[in-house]
Protein backbone atom coordinates (compact mmCIF):
# COMPACT_ATOMS: atom_id res chain seq x y z
CA UNK A 1 0.00 0.00 0.00
CA UNK A 2 2.86 2.36 0.86
CA UNK A 3 4.46 1.62 -2.52
CA UNK A 4 1.24 2.48 -4.36
CA UNK A 5 0.90 5.73 -2.40
CA UNK A 6 4.55 6.58 -3.04
CA UNK A 7 4.23 5.83 -6.76
CA UNK A 8 1.03 7.90 -7.07
CA UNK A 9 2.65 10.86 -5.27
CA UNK A 10 5.73 10.56 -7.45
CA UNK A 11 3.63 10.32 -10.63
CA UNK A 12 1.45 13.28 -9.61
CA UNK A 13 4.45 15.48 -8.81
CA UNK A 14 6.07 14.53 -12.12
CA UNK A 15 2.83 15.26 -13.99
CA UNK A 16 2.38 18.70 -12.43
CA UNK A 17 6.02 19.70 -12.73
CA UNK A 18 6.12 18.86 -16.43
CA UNK A 19 2.80 20.56 -17.10
CA UNK A 20 3.37 23.60 -14.88
CA UNK A 21 3.72 26.07 -17.74
CA UNK A 22 0.66 24.67 -19.50
CA UNK A 23 -1.40 24.94 -16.32
CA UNK A 24 -0.25 28.51 -15.79
CA UNK A 25 -1.23 29.41 -19.35
CA UNK A 26 -4.71 27.99 -18.70
CA UNK A 27 -5.15 30.72 -16.10
CA UNK A 28 -4.22 33.51 -18.54
CA UNK A 29 -6.87 36.22 -18.85
CA UNK A 30 -7.10 37.64 -22.36
CA UNK A 31 -9.12 40.75 -23.09
CA UNK A 32 -9.43 43.75 -25.39
CA UNK A 33 -9.73 47.27 -24.10
CA UNK A 34 -9.72 50.80 -25.45
CA UNK A 35 -8.00 53.81 -23.91
CA UNK A 36 -8.75 57.33 -25.12
CA UNK A 37 -7.19 60.67 -24.30
CA UNK A 38 -7.82 64.17 -25.58
CA UNK A 39 -5.31 66.93 -26.18
CA UNK A 40 -6.87 70.41 -26.11
CA UNK A 41 -5.23 72.91 -28.46
CA UNK A 42 -5.78 76.69 -28.48
CA UNK A 43 -3.81 78.88 -30.89
CA UNK A 44 -3.67 82.58 -31.61
CA UNK A 45 -3.59 84.10 -35.10
CA UNK A 46 -0.36 83.78 -37.04
CA UNK A 47 2.26 81.08 -37.33
CA UNK A 48 2.72 79.39 -33.97
CA UNK A 49 4.62 76.48 -32.51
CA UNK A 50 2.50 73.56 -31.42
CA UNK A 51 3.74 71.52 -28.48
CA UNK A 52 1.09 69.57 -26.57
CA UNK A 53 1.24 66.32 -24.64
CA UNK A 54 -0.80 63.72 -22.81
CA UNK A 55 -0.25 60.42 -21.08
CA UNK A 56 -1.88 57.04 -21.64
CA UNK A 57 -2.00 55.20 -18.34
CA UNK A 58 -2.98 51.60 -17.61
CA UNK A 59 -3.68 52.63 -14.01
CA UNK A 60 -6.63 54.80 -15.07
CA UNK A 61 -8.22 52.07 -17.23
CA UNK A 62 -10.62 49.97 -15.14
CA UNK A 63 -9.88 46.74 -17.02
CA UNK A 64 -6.07 46.93 -17.01
CA UNK A 65 -5.80 48.34 -13.47
CA UNK A 66 -7.23 45.06 -12.08
CA UNK A 67 -4.19 43.19 -13.44
CA UNK A 68 -1.58 45.94 -13.27
CA UNK A 69 1.14 43.79 -11.67
CA UNK A 70 0.07 40.64 -13.50
CA UNK A 71 0.30 41.79 -17.13
CA UNK A 72 2.15 39.39 -19.44
CA UNK A 73 1.71 41.00 -22.86
CA UNK A 74 0.20 44.11 -24.41
CA UNK A 75 -0.32 44.60 -28.12
CA UNK A 76 -1.50 47.86 -29.64
CA UNK A 77 -3.89 46.54 -32.27
CA UNK A 78 -4.77 49.99 -33.55
CA UNK A 79 -3.91 53.60 -32.75
CA UNK A 80 -5.90 56.45 -34.24
CA UNK A 81 -6.48 60.14 -33.72
CA UNK A 82 -8.90 62.73 -35.02
CA UNK A 83 -9.82 66.40 -34.62
CA UNK A 84 -12.88 67.06 -32.44
CA UNK A 85 -14.71 70.18 -31.15
CA UNK A 86 -13.28 72.69 -33.62
CA UNK A 87 -13.96 76.46 -33.43
CA UNK A 88 -12.26 79.40 -35.09
CA UNK A 89 -10.44 80.04 -38.35
CA UNK A 90 -11.89 77.66 -40.96
CA UNK A 91 -8.77 78.04 -43.11
CA UNK A 92 -6.26 77.39 -40.29
CA UNK A 93 -3.69 74.70 -40.97
CA UNK A 94 -1.64 72.30 -38.90
CA UNK A 95 1.60 70.43 -39.46
CA UNK A 96 2.48 68.02 -36.66
CA UNK A 97 4.39 64.96 -35.57
CA UNK A 98 2.92 62.57 -33.00
CA UNK A 99 5.53 60.93 -30.76
CA UNK A 100 5.39 58.27 -28.03
CA UNK A 101 8.21 58.50 -25.51
CA UNK A 102 10.27 60.44 -28.06
CA UNK A 103 9.72 58.08 -31.02
CA UNK A 104 7.79 59.28 -34.09
CA UNK A 105 4.49 57.47 -34.57
CA UNK A 106 2.85 59.53 -37.31
CA UNK A 107 2.98 62.91 -39.00
CA UNK A 108 0.62 65.16 -40.90
CA UNK A 109 1.55 68.12 -43.07
CA UNK A 110 -0.36 71.25 -44.03
CA UNK A 111 -3.83 69.93 -43.10
CA UNK A 112 -6.75 72.34 -42.83
CA UNK A 113 -8.01 71.68 -39.30
CA UNK A 114 -11.66 72.54 -39.98
CA UNK A 115 -11.77 70.30 -43.08
CA UNK A 116 -10.39 67.36 -41.10
CA UNK A 117 -12.94 68.06 -38.35
CA UNK A 118 -15.93 68.37 -40.72
CA UNK A 119 -14.91 65.22 -42.61
CA UNK A 120 -14.32 63.38 -39.29
CA UNK A 121 -11.00 62.21 -40.71
CA UNK A 122 -9.42 59.44 -38.68
CA UNK A 123 -5.64 59.30 -38.88
CA UNK A 124 -4.24 55.82 -38.22
CA UNK A 125 -0.73 55.11 -36.95
CA UNK A 126 0.65 52.40 -39.22
CA UNK A 127 4.28 52.39 -38.09
CA UNK A 128 4.36 48.82 -36.69
CA UNK A 129 7.84 49.15 -35.16
CA UNK A 130 6.87 52.32 -33.31
CA UNK A 131 3.62 50.70 -32.10
CA UNK A 132 5.58 47.69 -30.85
CA UNK A 133 7.99 49.96 -28.96
CA UNK A 134 5.06 51.92 -27.49
CA UNK A 135 3.38 48.67 -26.37
CA UNK A 136 6.64 47.47 -24.77
CA UNK A 137 6.96 50.78 -22.92
CA UNK A 138 3.32 50.61 -21.87
CA UNK A 139 3.82 47.09 -20.46
CA UNK A 140 7.03 48.03 -18.66
CA UNK A 141 6.11 51.48 -17.34
CA UNK A 142 2.30 51.13 -17.20
CA UNK A 143 2.09 54.40 -19.16
CA UNK A 144 3.35 56.16 -22.26
CA UNK A 145 3.76 59.86 -22.91
CA UNK A 146 2.42 61.17 -26.21
CA UNK A 147 3.55 64.50 -27.59
CA UNK A 148 2.32 66.52 -30.54
CA UNK A 149 5.02 68.74 -31.97
CA UNK A 150 4.62 71.07 -34.96
CA UNK A 151 3.09 74.36 -36.00
CA UNK A 152 -0.22 76.00 -36.79
CA UNK A 153 -0.93 78.77 -39.28
CA UNK A 154 -4.16 80.79 -39.01
CA UNK A 155 -5.49 84.28 -39.69
CA UNK A 156 -7.58 84.27 -36.50
CA UNK A 157 -7.59 82.22 -33.29
CA UNK A 158 -8.81 78.63 -33.32
CA UNK A 159 -9.23 75.85 -30.83
CA UNK A 160 -9.84 72.14 -31.16
CA UNK A 161 -9.16 68.84 -29.49
CA UNK A 162 -7.16 65.91 -30.77
CA UNK A 163 -8.75 62.65 -29.61
CA UNK A 164 -6.29 59.74 -29.44
CA UNK A 165 -7.48 56.12 -29.21
CA UNK A 166 -5.52 52.98 -28.40
CA UNK A 167 -7.12 49.57 -29.01
CA UNK A 168 -5.25 47.01 -26.95
CA UNK A 169 -5.05 43.22 -26.74
CA UNK A 170 -3.94 42.29 -23.22
CA UNK A 171 -2.87 39.03 -21.60
CA UNK A 172 -2.59 38.87 -17.81
CA UNK A 173 -2.15 36.03 -15.35
CA UNK A 174 -3.51 36.27 -11.83
CA UNK A 175 -0.74 34.00 -10.46
Image (cartoon, rainbow, N blue to C red):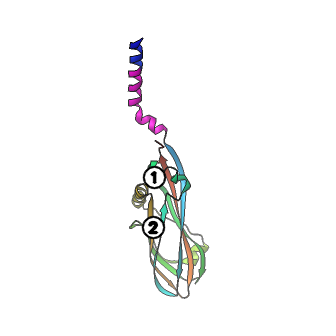
Q: Residue at x 41, y 31 (%)?
A: 19
Q: State the image coordinates of residue 28 (x, y, percent, origin top left).
A: 48, 42
Q: Residue at x 41, y 29 (%)?
A: 16
Q: Quadrant of residue 149?
A: bottom left
Q: Residue at x 52, y 50 (%)?
A: 66
- Which residue is disc 2 drawn over? 146
Specify few, some or many for label 2: CA neighbours under 10 Å numbering under 14, 14-19, or 20 or more: many
Q: CA distance from mark 2 to mark 1?
A: 17 Å
Q: State the image coordinates of residue 64 (x, y, percent, origin top left).
A: 51, 53
Q: State the image coordinates of residue 145 (x, y, percent, origin top left).
A: 44, 66
State whether residue 85 is above or below residue 129. below
- Which residue is disc 1 drawn over? 74
Tag 1's secondary structure? strand
Q: Nearer the viewer, residue 125 or 56?
A: 56
Residue bounds of the magenta highlight: 9-27
Q: Residue at x 40, y 13 (%)?
A: 2
Amino acid sequence: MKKILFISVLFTSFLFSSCGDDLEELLDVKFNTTITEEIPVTVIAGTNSLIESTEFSLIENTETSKYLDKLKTIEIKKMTYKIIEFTGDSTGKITAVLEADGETLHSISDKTVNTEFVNATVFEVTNKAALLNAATSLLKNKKISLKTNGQTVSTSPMSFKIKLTLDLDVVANPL
